[in-house]
Image (cartoon, helix red, strand yellow):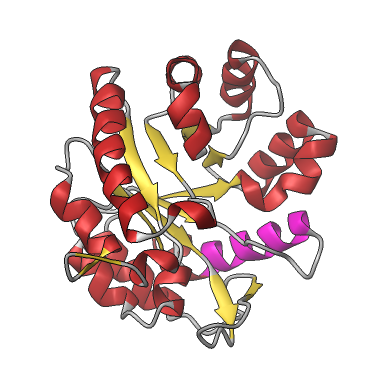
Amino acid sequence: MKRMSIGLQMYTLRDATAQDFEGTLRQVAALGYEGVEFAGYGDIPAERMRDLLQELGLKAIGSHIGLHLLENNLDNEIAYLKTIGAKYAICPWLPVEARDTEAWRTHLVNFEKYGARFAEEGIVFCYHNHDFEFEVEIDGQIVFDALYERITPEKLQVEMDIGWVQYSGVDPLAYIRKYAGRLPLLHLKDYRGGEKGKQIDTVELGRGDLPLNAIIETASEASVEWLIVEQDTCANPPLESVATSMEWVKANYLNKF
C-alpha cells in the first residue's frame, strides 16, 4: 500500500481558529498532522501564514474557496495560494438556490473557466461533494458524474468526501475506484446512523459505520495523495475530536509504514 499524507480540514476547528488561529495551527502540528486544508485564513497575511506553516512543518494542501470568492476574488485567492505554497483550490459547497439543473449548467461553464485560470498558475482546481450532487441530473446523468465527464481532468479534479458519498447510498469503494487517477484528495470522516434525509451524526474516526480500513486501502490503490480528516460537527471539544481521529490514523494506518 502506498503511503498517503495525512491532513486536516481546518473547518473542523472553526470555533478554535476564530479565537486563536495561529495557536490552533500549533496544536494541529503537535498532534502529528502533516498538512492542513484551509477554509478561510483568519485575516492572517499570506506571508505570515507561509512562515508559520514552515515553522510548524505543516504543508499547505490547499483551500476551500466559496463560490462567491471564485466569482469575485479569483486573482487574490490565487495569489494567497501561491504565496503559501498550496497546490489545490477547491470549491466546497453550493448554496441551495444554486443547485437545480439550470444552475448546474452554468456551474459547468464557470468551473471550466476557473480550472483553466488556476491551471495557468500551477494550481489544481477540485470540487468537493456533499449529497446533493447525487440528487440532481443533467440530461439523465447525476451531476456528480456529469461534472467530471464534461470538464477535462486538466481543469477539474475530484476531492471526494467519502462520508457524503456513503450517505447518498453509493458504494464508497466503487466510487473511489471509478475516479482513480483523478482523485488526489479524499475527505476521511466517520458517522453513525445517517439514514437518507436525516442529519448525519459525525463522529471521530473508528467510532462510526464507514468501512475506513477498506476505504484507505482502496484510496491508496487509486493514487490518492492526501487523506484529509474532517468532522463537520463534534459532540466533544473539536481539538479533542481531531486528536482522537489522529490516534486512530496512527494505530490503523501510519503504523504500517
Q: Is residue 248 magenta?
A: yes
Q: Quadrant of the C terminus?
A: bottom left
Q: Residue at x 47, y 48 (%)?
A: 92
Say whether residue 89 is left or right of residue 104: right
Q: Residue at x 38, y 34 (%)?
A: 88
Q: Quadrant of the N terminus?
A: bottom left
Q: Nearer the viewer, residue 24 or 13?
A: 13
Residue 144 visible at all:
yes
* Segment tinted magenta in the rendering: 238-251
Say whether residue 164 is left or right of residue 219: right
- The residue positioned farthest toward the right in the image shown: 19
Q: Residue at x 45, y 51 (%)?
A: 98
| Residue 142 falls in image quadrant | bottom left
Q: Nearer the viewer, residue 87 or 150?
A: 150
Q: Residue 202 location, x and y as percent? A: 63, 72
- Dominant SS in magenta: helix
Against 57, residue 144 (above or below) is below
Q: Nearer the viewer, residue 155 or 51?
A: 155
Say whether residue 84 is left or right of residue 242: left
Say whether residue 119 is left or right of residue 187: left
Q: Nearer the viewer, residue 92 or 218?
A: 92
